[in-house]
Amino acid sequence: MRALLLLLTVLGLGACHPCVEVCNDQATAYEACLSEWGLGWSDLGAADVDAWWERCSDDQEVWTDGLDSTRSDAEGAQCSGLRDGLRLAQTCDDRWAAMVEYGGY
């Protein structure tokens, strides 16, 4: 599963909107922490990490494509902040706090 996420990142997410890219970091956080949080993939409406990532990236792509450039830049900055917070997180509590601060799910 992680190999798929890495492959998707290498193959083309570099040109994607930051809100699409952050799906990788959220998927990694969920994969590491769902059981500690007492949750499962079904609680997120997905069968597994791959299904969640596909839905997240598809939803984010559709949503960000509909934004004007000013709003897209602002949202991109917020998503970059979430990405940075998740990458710096050392614990599941830190990951949860990063997502709650962003307003993520």
Image (spheres, rainbow, N blue to C red):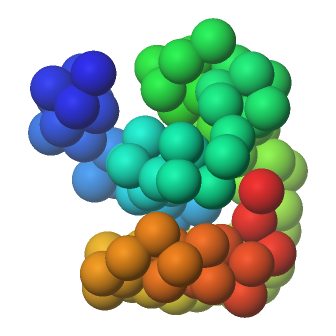
Looking at the picture, how far across and down is residue 103, in whole percent? 81, 75
In the displayed structure image, the side of residue 81 where residue 104 appears, left or right: right
Q: Is residue 6 above or below residue 34?
A: above
Q: Is residue 47 left or right of residue 2?
A: right
Image-quadrant location for residue 40 = top right
Q: Quadrant of residue 29?
A: bottom left
5 vs 94: above or below: above
Asked if residue 49 can be seen in this view, the reply is yes
Residue 21 rendering spot, x and y as whole percentages? 44, 54
Q: Residue at x 15, y 26 (%)?
A: 3
The residue at the point 74 percent across, 78 percent down is 100
Q: Position of residue 63 (x, y in %)?
A: 81, 48
Q: Quadrant of the N terminus?
A: top left
Query: Can see residue 80?
Result: no
- Nearer-the-camera pick, 47 or 33: 33
Q: Nearer the viewer, residue 54 or 100?
A: 100
Q: Quadrant of the C terminus?
A: bottom right
Residue at (64% x, 27% y) in the render: 41
**For the point 18% across and 37% down, which residue is it?**
6
- What number of labels is visible? 0
Instruction: Give above or below for 39 relative to 18.
Output: above
Image spot of residue 65 (x, y percent): 73, 48
Which residue is at the front of the view, 46 or 71? Answer: 46
